[in-house]
Image (cartoon, rainbow, N blue to C red):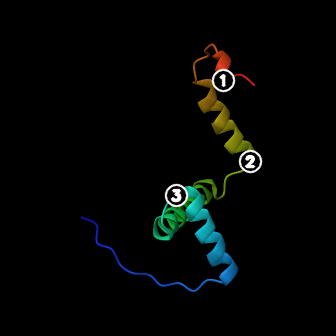
Amino acid sequence: MTRTNTLTIRVPEELKERIENTAILQGVSINQFALYAFTKELSELENSQYFRKQLKGKKKEEIIKGFDEVMAKVKAREVEDWDRL
């Protein structure tokens, strides 16, 4: 079982109202919405740091070359009608 803690944060009234309204629209509690929002943002920040670290010192051409090499390994296939623009 995951242990939980209480976190109290101070937010401007306008932001609090936006959080409450969004939680209502999503059909979840403010707590559930806050957990989702914190988790999502932390994941995005962590992913961004990871990619910055992986790409540090690499030139654009090197990155594009690596991407092209990976994409060349993808087998050609028929695109389904539902997946076309």
Q: Tell me residue 13's x, y (percent).
A: 66, 83
Which residue does the numbered mark 3 point to in the structure image?
27
Which residue does the numbered mark 2 point to in the structure image?
60
Report how far apart the C-alphas of labels 3 and 2 lie in the structure: 44 Å
Q: What amino acid is found at the position of numbered circle 2 in the picture?
A: Lys
Residue 17 against residue 35 in the figure, above or below: below
Residue 82 position by quadrant: top right
Q: Nearer the viewer, mark 3 or mark 2?
A: 3
Residue 71 against residue 44 in the figure, above or below: above
Residue 53 visible in this rendered orientation of the protein: no
Mark 3, secondary structure of its residue: loop
Tell me the residue at 53%/65% (across/down): 42
Tell me the residue at 62%/77% (across/down): 16
Q: What amino acid is found at the position of numbered circle 1 in the picture?
A: Asp
Q: Which quadrant: the N terminus?
A: bottom left
Q: What amino acid is found at the position of numbered circle 3 in the picture?
A: Gly
Which residue does the numbered mark 1 point to in the structure image?
83
User: Residue most toward the left?
Assistant: 1
Mark 1, secondary structure of its residue: helix
Callout 1: few (<14), some (14-19), or many (20+) C-alpha neighbours within 10 Å? few
Residue 27 visible in this rendered orientation of the protein: yes
Q: Tell me residue 70's x, y (percent).
A: 59, 32
Front in this rendered view, residue 10 or 27: 27
- Of mark 3 and mark 2, the one earlier in the sequence is 3
Tell me the residue at 67%/52% (across/down): 58
Circles 2 and 1: CB atoms closer than 8 Å: no
Q: Tell me residue 29's x, y (percent).
A: 48, 66
